[in-house]
Image (spheres, grey):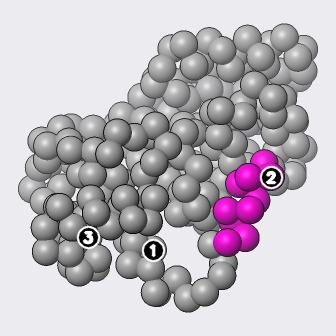
Amino acid sequence: MTRVMIADDHAVVRNGLKHILERAGEFDVVGEAADGAQIPMMVKDCAPNVLLLDLSMPGRSGLELIRRLREAYPALRILVLTIHSEEQYIVRAFQAGAAGYLTKESAAEELVTAVSHVATGGTYVGLSIAEKLASSFQGNSDEVPHRRLSNRELEVYRRLVRGEPLTNIALALCVSPKTVSTYKMRLMEKMQMPNEVQLVRYALRHHLFEEGENL
């Protein structure tokens, strides 16, 4: 049996994923996490073979978690399961060490296959994700300003575009408002944007944060 841990801040999603996996008869769901800060300790305690990880969880950035978990547990296979289908998230997730990338809208059809594949050492991407990955390698990345951002700056950018106050962003990322202000200043410098209105317009023009977002 493949030991699977599910990390998602929505109980309904966790229950749905657990039902799909247990019905397949090949997996043992050994733990569930609703907060990014819980995940490292739960991985240590539950010792899963595969971690199903939502990128947008409170407590810690999913991209940051992938990198840290891979460093601490090299044998752990991480399958990203998220609403984000934008190429900047796909590329960064694999660069951080993810073994697979699956969108929630395709989870019902592909979850069992994806988990089985990554558990045996493979890499899994759906067809639509593969197409976006291929397009991301065309051209010079320096020509696209948002690709210059660090993972944490990208997360702050996403939350700013959603209209979240700095204090809320700080709480969600477990940092101080002053630190968030620093990230905001840096990302605006890298993007060469004078204000948040320009940041929002850029995000809309480049379709950066469309999945599940209210822009």
SS for callout 1: helix
* Residue 157 screen position, x and y as percent: 30, 58
Residue with the most extreme left position: 178
Q: Is residue 125 left or right of residue 87?
A: right
Q: Is residue 188 left or right of residue 1?
A: left
The amino acid sitting under disc 3 is Leu
Q: Is residue 140 visible?
A: yes
Foreground tag (2 vs 1)? 2
Q: Is there a contact, CB below 8 Å, between mark 3 and mark 1?
A: no
Nearer-the-camera pick, 108 or 149: 108
SS for callout 2: helix
Q: Which mark is residue 127?
A: 2
N-term-proximal mark, 2 vs 1: 2
Q: Is residue 120 left or right of residue 12?
A: right
Q: Quadrant of the C terminus?
A: top left
Instruction: Work out how far the residue at label 2 is from the one at label 1, CA to CA, in angstroms.
Output: 23 Å
Q: Which mark is residue 147?
A: 1
* Residue 51 screen position, x and y as percent: 66, 36
Q: What residue span does the magenta drawing correspond to?
A: 126-135
Which residue lies at the image location 69% right of the left edge and 48% below the top edge?
Answer: 101
Which residue lies at the image location 74% right of the left edge and 52% below the top edge?
Answer: 128
Q: Which mark is residue 187?
A: 3
Nearer-the-camera pick, 42 or 134: 134
SS for callout 3: helix
Q: Verify whether residue 151 appears in magenta.
A: no
- The residue carrying pointer 1 sits among few (fewer than 14), some (14 to 19) or many (20 or more) residues within 10 Å by Cα, namely some
Image vertical order of residue 12 relative to residue 62, above or below: above
Instruction: Work out how far the residue at label 3 is from the one at label 1, CA to CA, in angstroms.
Output: 11 Å
